Amino acid sequence: MNEPLSKEEVDRLMQIKGNVRGAVFQTHAAYIRQKHGEKGLEAVEKRLRELGYPIKFNEVDPLNWYSEAHTILVILVAKELFNWDDSDVFDMGNTAPKYSFIVKLLMKYFLSPRKTFEMTPKYWEKHYDFGKLEIGQFNEKEKYMSVRIKGYKTHPIVCIFHRGYFLRICQYVIKSKDITMEETKCVFRGDPYHEYVARWK
Ligand SMILES: [Zn+2]
């Protein structure tokens, strides 16, 4: 069983500044509902209330700004309640773009892998009011690409979520069944930013 979240840990997380679109709450809710049903989602809302940071998923406005830490707390609570391990968090991230209307909106730009790659910093700006995503290498010949996230230090669980998320975007645009996504640098391992590298065959 996963350790229950401590109030201290949660309060510390919730002090982290930075906002994200409400759409992220909806995406998280959709995943939890799909995996654990309406009852599962209610259990998450109940636990968030207990911890002192309630949210009503149905009342979230997808275009408003909300605390990023609060959306991370949703993942942590689900991990606690449903006894998730890292692979569940990865799957949550990997599934998230399927529910995101922002991704759907941007789908029209998903013309080529390179175009999508060049769009990602704008995509970050649409989601977050802090940090930035920078594009690194895009090498079609050698079949790899990299992105970096700077000015973003919240909670290491998000690194796993993002790895799944970025892999999905690649799965949408790269015509390969064999794509891997690794986090090669991470601020929680002493690096100055997070770096994700995708490779495909
Ligand atoms: Zn990281």
Image (cartoon, helix red, strand yellow):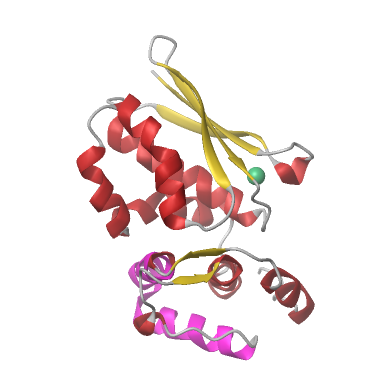
Q: Main secondary structure of the magenta part?
A: helix
Q: Residue at x 52, y 56 (%)?
A: 89
Magenta residues span 25-50
Q: Position of residue 104 (x, y in %)?
A: 24, 52
Q: Position of residue 46 (x, y in %)?
A: 52, 89
Residue 74: image quadrant is bottom right
Residue 142: image quadrant is top left
Q: Find ligand 1 in the image and state its quadrant.
A: top right
In the image, taking residue 1 as reference, residue 160 lies left or right, namely left
Residue 155 sits inside the magenta stretch? no
Q: Which one is in front, 40 or 127?
A: 127
Q: Residue at x 65, y 66 (%)?
A: 17
Q: Which one is in front, 198 or 15?
A: 15
Considering the image in quadrants, where does the C terminus appear? top left
How many numbered circles does the render carry? 0
Residue 84, compared with residue 78, is above or below; it is above
Residue placed furthest toward the top:
141
Q: Which one is in front, 198 or 129?
A: 129
Q: Residue at x 64, y 88 (%)?
A: 52
Considering the image in quadrants, where does the N terminus appear? bottom right
Q: Position of residue 36 (x, y in %)?
A: 40, 73
In the image, taking residue 101 as reference, residue 87 lies left or right, namely right
Q: Position of residue 135 (x, y in %)?
A: 50, 30
